[in-house]
């Protein structure tokens, strides 16, 4: 497996694999901030789940989402799955990833094996999926069978968010694969050169946009995330 490279520019430390694609970042003066808009959008589930018991992340990147969830949800368990042990080591050394404890488990294993492990079925309230190889051309796992296993890992009211970064014509392939195993799937407008973040619901929610905007204001106050823009995006999606 490739060893990730570290670079710094304008107060931001980046993780990459020798290509122009940045696979994670950390602002040096605020190690918990979510630097990229699409990473912020991966927290879209907060509009619907206020008190998760277990948050799982498939694909560690620079550890941004894992650190954010571990810090802001002290009553939840946070699990991160990363295939490349060198990425985990770099996150501990250069990206302020805390050591494992009773609430945090960062595991060096294949995401496919994790979601297909019978002991993980119905164990996650939230599943955040951001899986790419060194070249980051498209998600490394995006088959209907993979997303079916992700759905099996979620509780009855669980939610999955997915970063879909690929050529535009492949967005629909990924979304169709997700739709086969989830009651409802929505997505936000594209950001960052073909990044589309989708949200998938094990049970289709009853959406009240007035209440979502109220919830978004609370998220902006508590987590400093641009949640109102997410509700705007969901409304845009609803209108087609």
Image (cartoon, rainbow, N blue to C red):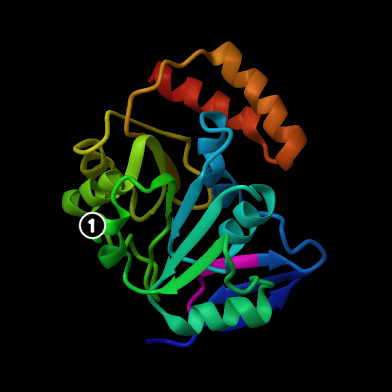
Q: Give whichever of 178, 156 is nearer the camera.
A: 156
Query: In terms of secondary structure, where does tag 1 sit?
Result: helix
Work out whether 26 lies above or below 1.
Answer: above
Extreme-front residue of the structure = 102
Residue on which disc 1 sits: 118
Q: Tell me if mark 1 has few (under 14), some (14-19) or many (20+) residues whose alpha carbon lies within 10 angstroms of its own.
A: few
Left or right of 217? Residue 212 is left
User: Which residue is at 71% across, 59% downward?
Assistant: 32
User: Which residue is at 38% across, 75% downward?
Assistant: 83
**Which quadrant holds residue 30?**
bottom right
Q: Position of residue 187 (x, y in %)?
A: 41, 35
> Where are the magenta residues, as a range?
18-25
Residue 18 visible, this orientation: no
Extreme-right residue of the structure = 29
The N terminus sits in image quarter: bottom left
Left or right of 56? Residue 68 is right
Q: Give whichever of 83, 192 is nearer the camera.
A: 83
Q: Position of residue 183 (x, y in %)?
A: 27, 28
Q: Is residue 50 magenta?
A: no
Work out whether 31 lies above or below 212.
Answer: below
Q: Where is residue 139 in the image (x, y as percent from the top left)?
A: 33, 60
Q: Position of residue 105 (x, y in %)?
A: 51, 67
């Amino acid at each position: 497996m490739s060893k990730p490279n570290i670079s710094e520019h304008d107060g931001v430390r980046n993780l990459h694999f020798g290509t122009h694609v940045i696979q994670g970042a950390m602002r040096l003066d605020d190690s918990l901030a979510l630097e990229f808009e699409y990473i912020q959008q991966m927290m879209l589930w907060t509009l619907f789940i206020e008190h998760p018991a277990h948050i799982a992340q498939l694909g560690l990147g620079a550890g941004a989402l894992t650190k954010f969830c571990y810090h802001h949800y002290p009553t939840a368990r946070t699990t991160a799955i990363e295939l490349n042990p060198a990425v985990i080591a770099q996150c501990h050394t250069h990206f302020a990833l805390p050591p494992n404890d009773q609430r945090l488990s960062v595991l060096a294993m294949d995401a496919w094996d994790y979601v297909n492990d019978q002991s993980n079925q119905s164990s996650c309230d939230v599943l955040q999926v951001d899986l790419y190889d060194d070249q980051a051309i498209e998600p490394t796992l995006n088959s209907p069978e993979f997303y079916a296993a992700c759905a099996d890992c979620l509780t009855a009211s669980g939610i999955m968010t997915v970063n879909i970064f690929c050529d535009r014509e492949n967005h629909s392939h990924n979304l169709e694969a997700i739709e086969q195993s989830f009651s409802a799937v929505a997505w936000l407008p594209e950001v960052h050169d073909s990044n589309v973040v989708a949200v998938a619901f094990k049970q289709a929610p009853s959406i009240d946009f007035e209440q979502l905007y109220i919830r978004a204001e609370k998220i902006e106050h508590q987590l400093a995330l641009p949640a109102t823009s997410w509700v705007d995006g969901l409304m845009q999606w609803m209108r087609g």
